[in-house]
Image (cartoon, rainbow, N blue to C red):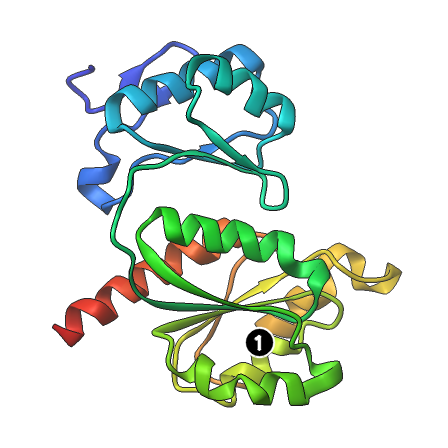
Amino acid sequence: MSSKSYDDMEFAKLDTDRELRQNVAEVVFCEGKEDEHLVKIFRRLYEQNGQVLGTRASAHQYDLVKEIIPEVEYDETSRILKVEKEKELIGNIAIVTAGTADIKVAEEAAQTAEFLGAKVNRIFDVGVSGIHRLLDKEDEIREANVVIAIAGMEGALASVIAGLVKNPVIAVPTSVGYGASFEGLSALLTMINSCANGVTVVNIDNGYGAAYSAVQINRLAVKGAD
């Protein structure tokens, strides 16, 4: 290990000090990595931490990692690749989607949050085109410490939720929609321009980023309740 608190693998420099600084070890963004590099990174992080989380992984990458870490798990919907320790899940993060087409992003968020130790409540397919479905879940959503609102098309779900609850709302625009949605840009602009208070927006399809922020808020809420 380097005296600079990173592990120099020549092609990569693993941030071995990150968990001490941020309470979360380095996470692997799998998409685009060379096969050999991905396998070596996964092995090294597993050896160091006993668990490792990878996002945007392919089935091919799962097969590669499984050869060296047989207990690795892969979920095709979320594209999460992980080796996970048992842990107690704390708090309450509500993950809400407008439609079923948004579930792949929602599952990336949900499984990331669970990996990082948060209890997750999945509330799917309650978009504004049938708002009675959302209102039926209003009390359930209010109970959460933080809400992740995930929507494509025009992205109105985040504004509606933020107008109903006092919880912080993290909005995730998705690339779901027809041509003029511009692969999520229309939802992104709607969410950024929300007139509802308490809405924070992450990048298009970035379930991981939303989960990371939500976990930090959830931990503070649990700590404050002690």
Give the image location of residue 120, x and y in percent.
41, 62
Q: Residue at x 66, y 78 (%)?
A: 156
- Report the side of 23 relative to 118 (left or right): left
Residue drawn at point x = 52 percent, y = 89 percent? 163
69 to 203, vertically: above or below? above
Horizontal placement of 49 versus 145: left or right?
Answer: left
The percent position of residue 11, horizontal first and vertical second, equals 44, 12
Give the SS element for disc 1: helix
Residue 145 figure quarter: bottom left
As drawn, which residue projects farthest toward the left? 226
Answer yes or no: is residue 203 visible: no
In which quadrant of the rendered image does the C terminus lie?
bottom left
Q: Which residue is mark 1?
A: 158
Packing grade of label 1 (10 A; few <14, some 14-19, many >=20) is: many
Is residue 124 something that shows in the picture?
A: yes
The three-letter amino acid code for the residue at tag 1 is Ala
Q: Can you tell which quarter of the image residue 82 is in?
A: top left
Residue 61 pos. (x, y %): 58, 22
Q: Residue at x 43, y 56 (%)?
A: 211
List x then y, in percent, for residue 149.
Answer: 55, 70
The image shows residue 31, relative to residue 209, as above or below, that is: above
